[in-house]
Image (tube, rainbow, N blue to C red):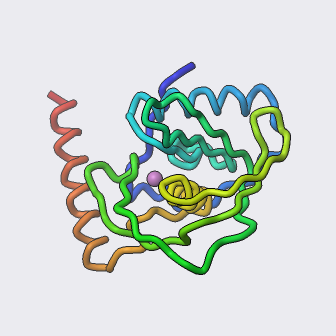
Amino acid sequence: MAILPILRYPDPRLYKKAEPVKQVDDRIRKLVSDMAETMYAAPGIGLAATQVDVHERVIVIDVSEEGNDLLVLINPEIIARSTDTQVYEEGCLSVPDVYDEVERAASITVRALNENGEPFEFEADGLLAVCVQHEIDHLDGKVFVEYLSRLKQERIRTRLRKREKERERVSVR
Ligand code: NI
């Protein structure tokens, strides 16, 4: 297992659309285990392969309190979504220290493959529904801040670029 570096917004690689996984093999299982380790170490409740610069449709999620209920989604699809919505304050490991409200479908039905390549379906609402939609957006090259106003997005980019420069200055010393 290994902790992978996480891309930071507005890195252009976060805008790439991920390709479907053709075969769920040991390479994908290794990616899943590295992604899970990276997510738990961060710590976070969800991570899409796009965020670790792998452009294949793989997601790990754990919304449990104890962090012991890993959900692996390979080639996930939302096959049904409610018309009613919910607003949640979201954050993202690729957009550190930024939290803002996003409106999404309140409940969804998801189809995906598990780590053994077997298809399964489930319904999600609450935080899990938010998380699945947020992570699938990553696979489609979309970061949650894109739901915010242009002014807010510009402020976030400015703040993160400044932070990145400070980090570089510290590491040069
Ligand atoms: Ni995210």
Q: Picture coordinates of residue 121 (x, y %)?
A: 77, 52
Q: Residue, x 52% and y 41% (percent of image)?
A: 52
Quarter of the rendering occupied by the N terminus: top right
Above or below 62: residue 33: above
Q: Name the residue nearer the viewer: 68 or 119.
A: 68
Above or below 59: residue 153: below
Q: Picture coordinates of residue 90 (x, y %)?
A: 38, 59
Decide if residue 164 is on the left or right side of residue 27. Answer: left
User: Which quadrant of the view contains residue 9?
Assistant: bottom left
Q: Name the residue nearer the viewer: 139 or 122.
A: 122
Tell me how many marks there are.
0
Q: Residue, x 26% and y 78% (percent of image)?
A: 151
Q: Picture coordinates of residue 45 (x, y %)?
A: 46, 42
Q: Residue furthest top?
A: 1
Quarter of the rendering occupied by the C terminus: top left
Above or below 13: residue 74: above
Q: Name the residue nearer the viewer: 37 or 13.
A: 37
Residue 13 visible here: no
Q: Residue, x 71% and y 58% (percent of image)?
A: 110
Decide if residue 75 is on the left or right side of residue 69. Answer: right
Q: Residue, x 70% and y 62% (percent of image)?
A: 109
